[in-house]
Image: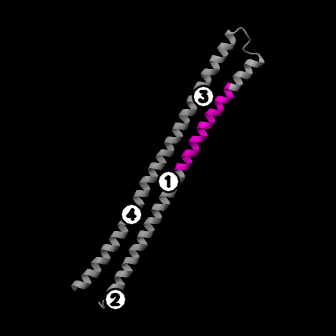
Amino acid sequence: MDPVTAMVVGSTALGIGGKVYEGKSAKKAASSEAQQLELNAARARREGRSRAQESRRQTSRIMSDATAAQASSGFSASDAQAIKQRGDISGAGKYNELAYLYESEMDAQGLQRGARNTRKTGSRQAKGAYLGAAQTAIGGYVDYKKLGL
């Protein structure tokens, strides 16, 4: 093989290898980023459940305190106003609990969408790089033919 042919073949091979490596790297980087987003989604859900559980615990404590205060005040803890107050406390507590769960679920779903989109982007970048490798191969062949080799 003459030196010119060797240069054309070597250059083409290096170009192809570089494009393939670029594609694999893009896909791997996207996959790593997507995994981190998925971990963040799981963490968001755990935090939401934890906050909801804490809200439930606080509501229960406040309800107990309200019942004790109502009973110690000399009034009946079972009269209409006392029941309404405890119902309001319970309702606000349940609202907060569900709001924490909803918020964390929305955050988690957003992170999961981001992970899917990141994977798709990485896959598209890899396909683009592989097409670039094919283009480099064709270009190398054309150069080879132009030189009349």
Magenta residues: mostly which secondary structure? helix
Distance CA(mark 4)–CA(mark 1): 18 Å
Q: Is residue 99 covered in magenta?
A: yes
Where is residue 131 shown, x and y percent of the image?
Answer: 43, 73
- Circle 1 sits on which residue? 115
User: What is the crowding at mark 2: few (fewer than 14 residues within 10 Å), some, or many (at least 20)?
Assistant: few
- Circle 2 sits on which residue? 145
User: What is the crowding at mark 1: few (fewer than 14 residues within 10 Å), some, or many (at least 20)?
Assistant: many
Q: Residue furthest right?
A: 80
Residue at image position (70%, 26%) is: 88
Nearest to N terminus: mark 4 or mark 1: 4
Provide the secondary structure element on which disc 4 rests: helix
Left or right position of 3 against 71: left
Q: Is the residue under label 3 in contact with that under label 1 (CB below 8 Å)?
A: no
Nearest to N terminus: mark 2 or mark 4: 4
- Circle 4 sits on which residue? 24
To which quarter of the image does residue 138 belong? bottom left
Q: What's under tag 4, amino acid-wise?
A: Lys
> Relative to residue 45, is residue 61 depicted above or below?
above
Provide the secondary structure element on which disc 1 rests: helix
User: What is the crowding at mark 4: few (fewer than 14 residues within 10 Å), some, or many (at least 20)?
Assistant: some
Left or right position of 145 against 82: left
Where is residue 110 shown, x and y percent of the image?
Answer: 55, 49
Q: Is residue 72 covered in magenta?
A: no
Q: Which residues are magenta?
A: 89-111
